[in-house]
Amino acid sequence: MNFALPSWIEGIVALLLVAGGLLALTGAIGLLRYGDFFRRMHPPALATTLSALCVTLASSIHFSVLEQQLALHPLLINALLAITAPVTTVLLARAALARGRDMSADVPPPLAANEPPPQRR
Amino acid sequence: MSALLAAAIVVTLGLYSLAMMLAVVRLLRGPQAQDRVLALDFLYINGMLIMLVLGIRFSSGMYFVVALLIALFGFVGSAALAKFLLRGELIE
C-alpha cells in the first residue's frame, strides 16, 4: 500500500502543482492591478479553470498511482466549478451593470431603446 | 515522498498563499461592493485548491471531501451575495 511513487510520476505531479500555483498567482495579480471592475472579472477565471485543472489532475495522477486503481474523483471538482463559476460571474456582472446604471456611471446602456430596465426594487 | 515532490508542494502552497494575500488586498481596498465579492470568490477557490494540495501532501482522501464542500458552500455564498447586490433582498 505505502510504496514510493516512481520518480517520473512525482516529477509530473510536481510540475502540475507548481504550474497551478503560478496560474493562480497570475490571476491574483490581474485581480489586483486591473483598473476597472469589468476587466477585473476576467483574471480570477484563470484560477477556476486552468489552475484547478492542473491541481485536480495532479491529485488524480497521484492517487491513481498510489492506490493502484484509477482515481477520477478529483476531476469531480472541475465539473462542479464548470457549472458554478459562470453562474457567479454572470450574476456579479449583472449586479455591477445594474448598480452602475443606478449611479449613472459609464456603463453600456440597455441594448434596445424600448427594452425594460433590469428589474430592481 | 521524494524531496522533489515535497519541495514542489511547499512552493505551491507559498504561491497560493501569495495569491490569497493579493486577493485580500483587493478585498480591503475594492472601491465597490462587487469588487469585494469578486475577491471573496477568488479567496474560496484558492482555499479549495490548497485543500487539494494538502491532500496530496498527506496522501489522504479526506481533503478531497473538504475541497468539495468548500466549492459548494462558496458558490452558494457568492451567488447569494451577487443576488443581494442585484436586488437588495434575498428571499422573495
Image (spheres, coloured by chain):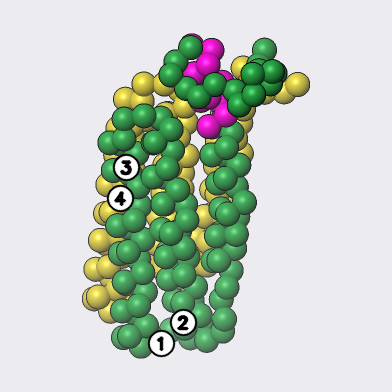
Chain colours: A green, B yellow
Residue drawn 43% across the image and 19% down it: A106
Camera-near label (4 vs 3) is 3
Residue drawn 42% across the image and 64% down it: A55
Q: Which mark is residue A30?
A: 3
Magenta portion: prevailing SS class: helix
- In this figure, which residue is indicated by the disc labeled 1? A3
Q: Is residue A103 left or right of residue A14?
A: right
Label whose residue precedes the other's in the sequence (2 or 4): 4
Label whose residue precedes the other's in the sequence (3 or 1): 1
Label whose residue precedes the other's in the sequence (3 or 2): 3
Q: Quadrant of residue B91 in the image?
A: top right
Label whose residue precedes the other's in the sequence (2 or 1): 1
Q: In this figure, what is the number of numbered marks?
A: 4
Q: CA distance from mark 4 to mark 1?
A: 33 Å
Q: Amino acid at mark 1?
A: Phe
Q: Chain of mark 4?
A: A
Camera-near label (3 vs 1) is 3
Residue drawn 31% across the image and 71% down it: A15
Q: Which mark is residue A66?
A: 2
